[in-house]
Image: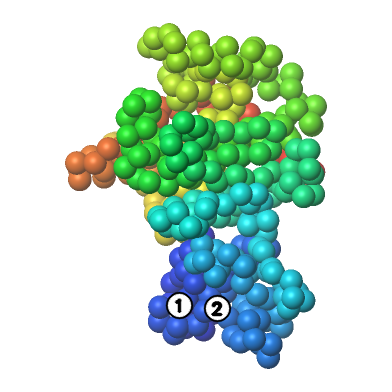
C-alpha cells in the first residue's frame, strides 16, 4: 500500500480515510490514479472537485455505499437520478442484511478487506470483469449469513467467478476459533479474498488463456476429482514433509487450492513490500554475511521488480518482523516457510502476472 497525503495541508492520509484529520477536507479514493484526494464542493450538491492536480477540474461523487460508511471510493458524477456505485462495489451481488444487529459493522470490515484486494488487483493491472459485464464467468461477491436456525451454515468459496464469503468471518473471535479448529497458521478476511480471487484468476489466466498444461507442470493435475480430494484431505493424517512443496497444509488438498494459496501469498508479498518501501523500511541483518537487498531499495514490486528481487527483499523483511513479534511475545507475523519448491510455484504466479501485464 502506498502512503498518501492531503493535497491541502500535506497531512499523512491512510487508505480508508474519509476526511483529513488536520484540515478536515473530505477525502476520497480515485481508483484510476491509485490516489487519495482531498475534495472541494462543486456547484451541484453532492458533487466534488478533486484537489489532486491531475484531475482538478473533474466532477466526482462518492460511491453510494459511502452513506453506510463502508466505502470512500469516488466515481464520475452522473445524472442526479442515478445512484452511483464505485468500481469496487459494482462487484457486490449480495450484501449482508443490514436489519440484523451487528451486520453493518461486519460489512464494514468486509469492505475494508475487499477494497484492499481491489487496490492490489488494479495496481497489478489484472483483467477484471464483473458479473454484469460477463454473466457466465465475471467476478461477483455474495456476503451471506448462516440460516437463523443454524441448519445451513454458509461456506466461503468460489464457483466460476462467484465468491461467497460467510460474514461470520468478520467476527474476530469466531474467525480465530475456526483458525484453531482447522489448524491454520493464518486466517484473515483479506487472506480469504486473496485466496478466493486466485480461483477466479486460474479461470481467467490459466484455463481461458491456454496455460493449463504449463500450470499442471508446476501445481499438478487439476483433473483430479475436487470433492473427493477435499474429503481425502480432511480424512487422512497430514504428512510431515508437506512444507517442502506447499505454502500451507490446505494447499495439499488439490492443485486448484495449491494455486489459490500460492496466488494469495504472492499478493501478500507484493502488497507488504510496497508498504515497507513506502515507509522507508530497510533491512540489513547484522550477521556478518554480505548485505542483502532491502524493501527500501526495491523497484515497484507490482510492475517492475524481478522475482529474485522480490524474494531477496521479502525474506529478510519477514525474518525481522517475525523477530520483532517474538520480542513482544506475539505469534510470527509471517508463519510460513518458502522452500525451493514453494518458490518455484511463486515464480510461476509472478511470470503469469508479468505476461498478463505485457499484453495489456
Pick the front one: 320 or 360: 360
When the figure is inspected, residue 176 is found, relative to residue 130, above or below; the finding is above
Q: Residue furthest bottom?
A: 43
- Residue under label 2, please give it: 38
Label annotation for residue 20: 1
Q: Residue at x 57, y 52 (%)?
A: 95
**For residue 291, what is the image quadrant?**
top left
Residue 295's spot in the image, x, y percent? 46, 49
Residue 63's spot in the image, x, y percent? 62, 67
Are the residues at dot 1 and dot 2 in contact (C-beta closer than 8 Å)? yes
Residue 303's spot in the image, x, y percent? 64, 48
Between the C-alphas of marks 1 and 2, the distance is 8 Å
When the figure is inspected, residue 150 is found, relative to residue 301, above or below; the finding is above
Pick the front one: 94 or 355: 94
Number of marks in picture: 2
Q: Residue at x 53, y 17 (%)?
A: 230
Is residue 99 something one can see in this rendering? Answer: yes
**For residue 217, what is the image quadrant?**
top right
Q: Residue at x 43, y 36 (%)?
A: 149
**For residue 56, what is the image quadrant?**
bottom right
Q: Is residue 353 left or right of residue 292?
A: right
Residue 155's spot in the image, x, y percent? 52, 32
Pick the front one: 333 or 95: 95
Colour mapping: rainbow
Q: Is residue 265 left or right of residue 32?
A: left
Please, what secondary structure does the residue beneath circle 2 have? strand
When the figure is inspected, residue 201 is found, relative to residue 300, above or below; the finding is above
Label annotation for residue 144: none
Please, what secondary structure does the residue beneath circle 1 have? loop
Q: Residues within 10 Å of mark 2 (few under 14, many from 20)?
A: many
Amino acid at each position: 500500500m502506498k502512503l498518501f497525503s492531503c493535497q491541502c495541508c500535506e497531512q499523512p492520509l491512510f487508505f480508508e480515510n474519509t476526511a483529513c484529520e488536520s484540515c478536515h477536507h473530505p477525502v476520497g479514493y480515485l481508483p484510476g490514479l491509485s490516489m487519495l484526494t482531498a475534495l472541494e464542493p462543486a456547484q451541484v450538491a453532492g458533487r466534488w472537485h478533486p484537489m489532486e492536480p491531475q484531475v482538478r477540474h473533474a466532477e466526482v461523487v462518492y460511491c453510494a455505499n459511502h452513506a453506510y460508511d463502508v466505502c470512500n471510493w469516488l466515481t464520475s458524477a452522473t445524472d442526479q437520478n442515478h445512484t452511483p456505485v464505485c468500481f469496487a462495489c459494482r462487484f457486490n451481488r449480495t450484501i449482508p442484511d443490514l436489519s440484523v444487529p451487528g451486520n453493518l459493522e461486519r460489512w464494514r470490515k468486509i469492505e475494508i478487506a475487499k477494497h484492499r484486494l481491489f487496490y492490489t488487483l488494479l495496481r497489478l493491472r489484472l483483467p477484471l470483469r464483473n458479473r454484469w459485464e460477463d454473466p457466465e464467468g465475471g467476478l461477483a461477491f455474495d456476503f451471506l449469513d448462516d440460516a437463523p436456525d443454524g441448519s445451513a451454515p454458509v461456506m466461503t468459496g468460489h464457483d466460476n467467478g462467484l465468491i461467497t464469503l460467510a460474514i461470520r468471518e468478520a467476527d474476530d473471535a469466531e474467525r480465530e476459533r475456526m483458525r484453531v479448529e482447522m489448524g491454520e497458521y493464518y486466517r484473515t478476511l483479506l487472506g480469504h479474498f486473496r485466496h478466493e480471487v486466485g480461483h477466479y484468476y486460474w479461470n481467467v489466466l490459466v484455463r481461458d488463456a491456454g496455460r493449463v498444461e504449463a500450470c499442471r507442470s508446476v501445481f499438478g493435475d487439476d483433473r483430479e476429482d475436487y470433492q473427493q480430494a477435499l474429503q481425502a484431505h480432511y480424512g487422512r493424517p497430514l504428512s510431515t514433509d508437506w512444507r517442502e512443496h506447499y505454502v500451507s497444509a490446505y494447499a495439499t488438498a488439490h492443485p486448484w487450492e495449491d494455486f489459490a494459496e500460492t496466488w494469495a501469498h504472492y499478493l501478500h508479498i507484493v502488497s507488504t513490500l510496497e508498504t515497507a518501501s513506502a515507509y522507508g523500511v530497510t533491512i540489513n541483518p547484522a550477521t556478518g554475511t554480505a548485505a542483502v537487498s532491502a524493501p527500501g531499495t526495491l523497484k515497484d514490486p507490482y510492475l517492475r521488480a524481478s522475482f529474485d528481487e522480490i524474494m531477496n527483499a521479502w525474506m529478510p523483511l519477514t525474518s525481522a518482523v517475525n523477530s520483532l513479534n517474538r520480542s513482544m511475545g506475539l505469534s510470527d507475523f509471517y508463519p510460513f516457510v518458502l522452500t525451493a519448491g514453494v518458490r518455484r510455484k511463486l515464480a510461476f504466479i509472478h511470470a503469469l502476472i508479468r505476461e498478463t501485464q505485457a499484453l495489456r
